[in-house]
Image: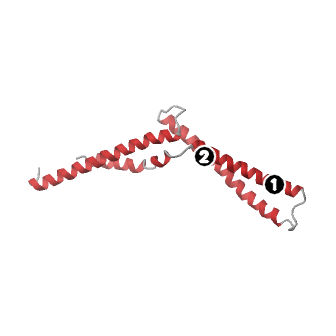
């Protein structure tokens, strides 16, 4: 029984536990989704600009004011999405370099391998715990050794 080693393995499993979820991430889809948000937002902005250029609506400009506020908030959020996605891509590129992975390794492939490693650690920890439990039971039955 190596309780310290098992504790370290268990701590590593906890630390790397999110690798399973990260393995499900498809950066291509995320980039496409953010691109769709950006394109949709640009269309809304363009519609608002055209509406203002054509003299607005019959409601005294309430619609344009409301949409202007919306565009201000939504624009910040859409730009934030792109910035966050860029940050994640940069961090993953650094992670790839740190682990010596090729540039072509995808996020999902990288984290799938890491997830498999975590599963192996979990299995080893479970076997060690089982062996320790069996050894403890044997010691109780035999009175010590």
Q: Position of residue 129 (x, y in %)?
A: 26, 50
Numbered-mark total: 2
Towards the viewer: 2 or 81? 81
Residue farthest along the right direction in this orientation: 55
Q: Residue at x 53, y 46 (%)?
A: 25
Across and down, in percent, residue 126 comes to: 29, 49
Residue pushed farthest left? 142
Specify whether 36 is left or right of 117: right
Quadrant of the rendered structure where residue 56 is? bottom right
Q: CA distance from mark 2 to mark 1?
A: 26 Å
Left or right: 117 in relation to 22: left
The residue that disc 2 covers is 30
Left or right: where 21 falls relative to 27? left
Assess whether mark 1 and mark 2 are in contact (beta carbons under 8 angstroms). no
**Image-quadrant location for residue 90:** top right
**Residue 62, relative to residue 103: is it above or below?**
below
Q: Earlier in the sequence, mark 2 or mark 1?
A: 2
Q: Residues within 10 Å of mark 2 (few under 14, many from 20)?
A: some
- 72 and 34: which is toward the camera: 34
From this view, report whether residue 73 is shown above or below residue 27.
below
- According to the image, what is the colour scheme of the structure? secondary structure
The x, y position of residue 115, in whole percent, is 42, 44
Q: Secondary structure at mark 1?
A: helix
Q: Which residue is mark 1?
A: 47
Residue 44 % position (x, y):
77, 54
Secondary element under disc 2, as helix, strand or loop, is: helix
The residue at the point 74 percent across, 57 percent down is: 72
* Residue shown at the point (17%, 53%) measured from the top left: 136
Q: Which mark is residue 116?
A: none
């Amino acid at each position: 029984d190596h309780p310290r080693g098992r504790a370290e393995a268990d701590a590593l499993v906890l630390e790397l536990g999110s690798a399973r979820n990260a393995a499900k991430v498809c950066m291509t889809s995320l980039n496409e989704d953010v691109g769709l948000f950006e394109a949709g937002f640009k269309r809304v902005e363009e519609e608002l600009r055209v509406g203002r250029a054509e003299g607005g609506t019959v409601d005294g400009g309430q619609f344009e004011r409301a949409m202007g506020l919306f565009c201000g908030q939504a624009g910040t959020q859409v730009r934030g999405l792109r910035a966050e996605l860029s940050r994640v891509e940069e961090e993953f590129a650094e992670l790839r370099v740190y682990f010596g992975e090729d540039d072509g390794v995808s996020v999902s492939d990288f984290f799938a391998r890491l997830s498999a490693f975590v599963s192996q650690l979990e299995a080893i920890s479970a076997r060690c715990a089982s062996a320790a439990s069996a050894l403890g039971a044997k010691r109780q039955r035999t009175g010590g050794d």
